[in-house]
Image (cartoon, rainbow, N blue to C red):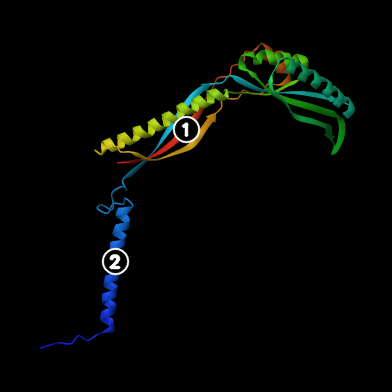
Amino acid sequence: MVKLWKWHPWGSLKLATGLGMVLAVAVLSWTLMGSGGVMANPSEGSRILTVTGQGSTPVETSIAQIRLGVMLRGDSAQTVQQQVAERSERLVTRLKELQVNALQTTGISLYPQYDYRDGQSHLTGVQGQNSVQFEVPVASAGQVLDEAVAAGATQVESVSFRAEDAALVQARSRALTQAVEDAQRQAQDVLGALNLTLGSVERIQIHSDGRVTPPPVPLAPSADFARSEIASTPVEGGEQRVHAQVTLEIRY
C-alpha cells in the first residue's frame, strides 16, 4: 500500500526554522573557535581581583621660592611712585648681581588711603608697592634675603620650598614602585587566606601622577622682622613627599 505525501505549508515552515537554528549554532561555534574563544567553561576568565596600592616617598627640598616687596607711603601719588620705582630698581639690580633664578615682577599697586571719621572719608596719603619673586638654593636663601633687604626690600611676603625636577622624577619612580608592591602584597594576602593562586596581571591603572605634598610653608615675616631678624636666621627647606596610587586587576 502506497501512501502519498501531502505538502503542508506549516510543516515546511517548522522544518526551515529548525534547519536555520542548527545552521546558526554551527556558524557561532566556528566563529568562537576561530577567534580563540572558549566555550567549555563560560565562567572561566571572570575571576579577577582588583586591588589598589599606595606609595609615598620623601624628597629633600633644595630650592627656596621667595617673594619680596617694596612698600612705601607718602603724601602724593607721584612722589610715592617715584620712590617705589627707585627702590625697586636697586632691589632688582642687586638680585641680578646675586644671580637669582626665575626673577619676575608679580605685582604693582598704587592707591590712596583714607581715614573715616564722623561718616566722612579723609585722604591721608598714598601707598605704593612693587613685588618680585625669584628662586635661590636653600643654602644661600638667608644671605640673599639679607642683601635684598639692604637693597631696599621692605617686606618678605612669602618663602616656600621645593625639590629639583630631577629629584622629583626619581621620587615619583620610587613611589610608583611602592604602590605596585603594596597592591601585589594585598592580593597575595587575600588570595593566600582563601587558598587561591595568584595569576597574571590583566590591567594596570595609575590614578595619581606623582602628586606632591609640599613642606610646611613658614609664615611670611613682617617688614620689621625682615629688617632685623631674617638675615641672621638660618633657612631650612625640609622635605616634601611624592605620592602615587596604582590599581591592579589580577587573574586568580
Residue 244's tag is 1
Instruction: Find residue 96 and report its horizontal and vertical position in percent.
Output: 74, 18
Report whether residue 76 is seen. no
Instruction: Find residue 73 and report its horizontal and vertical position in percent.
Output: 83, 25
Report whether residue 226 is seen. yes
- The kind of residue on which mark 2 rests is Leu
Instruction: Find residue 26 and report its horizontal and vertical position in percent.
Output: 28, 62
Q: CA distance from mark 1 to mark 2?
A: 53 Å
1 or 2: mark nearer the eye: 2
Residue 23's tag is 2
Which residue is at 31% across, 53% downward? 34
Horizontal relation, residue 173 to residue 114: left or right: left
Q: In the image shown, does 238 or 46 lie closer to the viewer?
A: 46
Q: Secondary structure at mark 1?
A: strand
Q: In the image shown, does 135 or 109 lie closer to the viewer?
A: 135
Which residue is at 42% across, 29% downward? 177
Q: Secondary structure at mark 2?
A: helix
Quadrant location, the N terminus: bottom left
Quadrant location, the C terminus: top left
